[in-house]
Amino acid sequence: MRPHPHRPAVWDRGADAMDRAAAEGAFDDLPLAGQPLDLRDAHDPDWWVKRRLAAGDIEREALLPLPVLLRREAARLDDTLAAFTREEQVREYVADYNRRVRDDALAAPGPFGGAVPLDPEMTVARWRRVRGWE
């Protein structure tokens, strides 16, 4: 066998030895034959994220796109409002939420698919209803 121009001769000897062993059946009936290899660390570019998720170091929700997070936050609005004790806190929350919605809309050009801003007055009225004051 002629040596490959880009491989050292040692490589060829090793490859030849493995080919002979395979032809003689040395690799037949190995204990884990046909089982998948655990190569997650070596071949998966996201191995570190998956490992941190499995360990519980990262919440899965933190990996979601911002528009999805904002829509989920809006869906839990009553629970969020119930935690506020003063109208000022509600208005600060609405201003912060609307700023995040606006920033997301500016950062993601294209068709609208993000969250809808909250109306401050309607949100305060909703807060009063959630608190049982109306």
Image (spheres, rainbow, N blue to C red):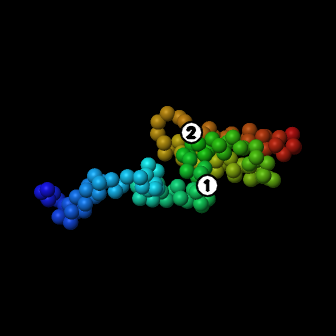
Could you tell whether 25 is left or right of 100 in the image?
left
Q: Is residue 67 visible?
A: yes
In front of the other: 9 or 131? 9
Measuring 62% from the left and 38% from the top, which residue is drawn there? Answer: 116
35 or 106: which is nearer to us?
A: 35
The image's mark for residue 68 is none
Q: Nearer the viewer, residue 65 or 131?
A: 65
Query: Which residue lies at the image location 74% right of the left edge and 41% below the top edge?
Result: 123
- Amino acid carrying label 2: it is Gly
Residue of label 2: 114
Characterize the local packing of mark 2: few (<14), some (14-19) or many (20 or more) Cα atoms within 10 angstroms: some
Viewer-side residue, 12 vs 45: 12
Residue found at the very far right of the displayed protein? 133
**On the image, which quarter does residue 78 sit in?**
top right
User: Looking at the picture, how far across and down is residue 97, in whole percent?
Assistant: 64, 47
Task: Give SS at disc 1.
Answer: loop
Going from N to C along the chain, the mark reached first, 1 or 2, is 1
Q: Residue furthest front?
A: 24
Amino acid type shown at disc 1: Glu
Q: Position of residue 76 (x, y in %)?
A: 71, 44
As helix, strand or loop, the secondary structure at mark 2 comes to loop
Which residue in the protein does label 1 denote?
Answer: 59
The answer to whether marks 1 and 2 mark residues whose Cβ atoms lie closer than 8 Å is no
Q: Can residue 15 be seen here?
A: no
Residue 18 pos. (x, y %): 28, 58
Give the x, y percent position of residue 101.
59, 44
